[in-house]
Image (cartoon, rainbow, N blue to C red):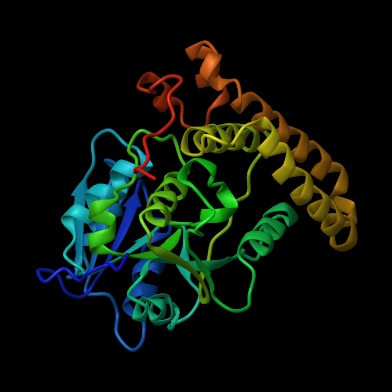
Amino acid sequence: MKAAADSNSTGISVVVPVLNAAGTLPALLEALASQQPAPPDEIVLVDSLSTDATRQIARQHANVRVVPLGRFSHGRARNLGAQESSGRIIVLMTQDALPADKRWLAALLEPFDDEQVAAVYSRQIPRPNAPPTERFFLQYHFPPGAPVRRTRSAQTSAATLKLPDVFFSNVSAAVRREALLSYPFDETLIMSEDQQFARDLIVAGYAIVYQPASVVIHSHRYSLLTAFRRYFDSVYSLTRIFPAHDLKVSAGMGRRYLREEAAYILRQHPFYFPYYCLYTLCKVSGVLCSHVAGRMPKGLARACSLHRYYWEHEPRDEHAAGPPP
């Protein structure tokens, strides 16, 4: 399917969900303003009621608008930003991602010369202080090289799609406005709303492109408990997005990843290996618990989760609705 142009929208809008972003926002806005050959036309900050200087920093920039958001979800914040923006291309970012150079935006937009392409996402590289596990994660999922184009094959049905078929990240991504408004993010997911969005686009006949020439600096440093909770949330979301993502699928994907990750740690960071074993145990425990989250008492699920607010409103034992096959 071709993504037709929206005659009422022009230019490039950047949408960034923010919460107490004063520590990272100045550098991000400066990097956006320095993009060549031209910076984005507008920046929309979807603010979850920040209590720091986020709004004051935004007011110092003429092309930055702040849109307040009440009850947060990752999908709701991005949908609201898209609705409030005016660009024909909407660039999605997180507040802790930073363009690595002045050609980040231009490279991100290049694949849209192909009218079937509805969404493009950037390569992510780690910060200097990123732990070895995060370095491997980014190297594994966001390698250098040539662009990768993902579309639905004739042999693949919506019910059999898996995460590798549609992998996408809205840490730094660009989307055609019409595609985003037609296939909005699922506002009921705890996280991984970008994978749901990519699944819907591919089922609808669009293409998604990984563009490694567009690079952002973005990484995390998780504690053992945070790693458990993040993987609990992430894999629980995947079980709602992909009906076929059961424990067997998680185990199959995890075996290959852990085998390569362990080899990398032993080769590059051998003294880190004992901690890596503990870290991996926490991740795997989070994955295992996620597969029974729908049957847990709500209080226990909340204790396991990084996004505890979610379990007050979570739709139990239902898969996220997808588009028709």
Residue 92 in view of the camera: yes
Instruction: Examine the rendered structure and indicate whether residue 309 appears above or below residue 178.
Output: above
Q: How many marks?
A: 0
Quadrant containing the N terminus in the rendered view: bottom left
Q: Is residue 283 visible?
A: no
Residue 268: name its quadrant: bottom right
Depth check, front residue: 296 or 42: 296
Q: Is residue 64 above or below residue 202?
A: below
Task: Residue at the far front: name it.
Answer: 155
55 displayed left or right of 222: left
Residue at the location (51% across, 59% down)? Answer: 153
Check the image and name the residue furthest to the top: 297
Q: Position of residue 26 (x, y in %)?
A: 36, 65
Tell me the quadrant of the picture where the C terminus can be found: top left
Residue 163's x, y, as percent?
A: 56, 48
Instruction: Give me the residue at 47% from left, 49% from top.
Output: 195
> Residue at image x 36%, y 86%?
36
At 73% across and 42% down in the image, what residue appears?
252
Quarter of the image holding residue 56?
bottom left
Residue 107 screen position, x and y as percent = 44, 80
142 vs 185, left or right, is: right
Residue 235 located left or right of residue 25: right
Q: Position of residue 31 (x, y in %)?
A: 39, 74
In the orientation shown, which residue stands out farthest toward the bottom? 37
